[in-house]
Image (tube, rainbow, N blue to C red):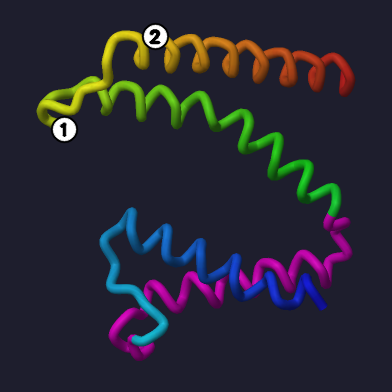
Amino acid sequence: GTGLLAIPILATSASYALAEVFGWREGLSKKFRQARPFYLTIMVSIALGVGMNLLGLPAFNMLIVAAVLNGLLAPLMLWYIIRLADRSDVVGEHRSPPAVRLGGWLTFGLMTIAGAIVLLNFVKGSG
């Protein structure tokens, strides 16, 4: 029951996030024709979830795969965020202080090393 409640919430939150990134009109108060990409994202997300279930893909394993992919992509996102936070043409006078940037780059380095270790172990294990 909880899973059934989570499906539309997760699909809708993903749709809101994509609408924010791409500047789409969004909102459940809008009609389909007013926010077509927003509603299509919800429908595709739900269809993917149902399709994975119909294919018999184990949900727990998919959660692990999602977490690993998130961990591998996180350094790329951190790199981008740290670089943006250091650009005065983007953030104006609110640039990150040097200590915050240093912490960000240290985190980036550690996460990159951790991701490399995961990938190396995967390659060793599958070879």
* Mark 1 burial class by Cα count in 10 Å: few <14, some 14-19, many 20+: few
Q: Is residue 59 above or below residue 119?
A: below
| SS under mark 1 | helix
Residue 68 in the magenta stretch? The answer is no
Q: Main secondary structure of the magenta part?
A: helix
At label 1, the amino acid type is Val
Return the mark for residue 105.
none
Q: Position of residue 113 (x, y in %)?
A: 62, 11
Q: Position of residue 33 (x, y in %)?
A: 32, 88
Question: What residue range appears in magenta?
Answer: 30-59
* Mark 2 burial class by Cα count in 10 Å: few <14, some 14-19, many 20+: few
| SS under mark 2 | helix
Residue drawn at x 36%, y 86% as measured from the top left: 29
Q: Nearer the viewer, residue 125 or 88?
A: 88
From the image, tell me which residue sits under label 1: 90
Q: How many marks?
A: 2
Q: Quadrant of residue 95?
A: top left
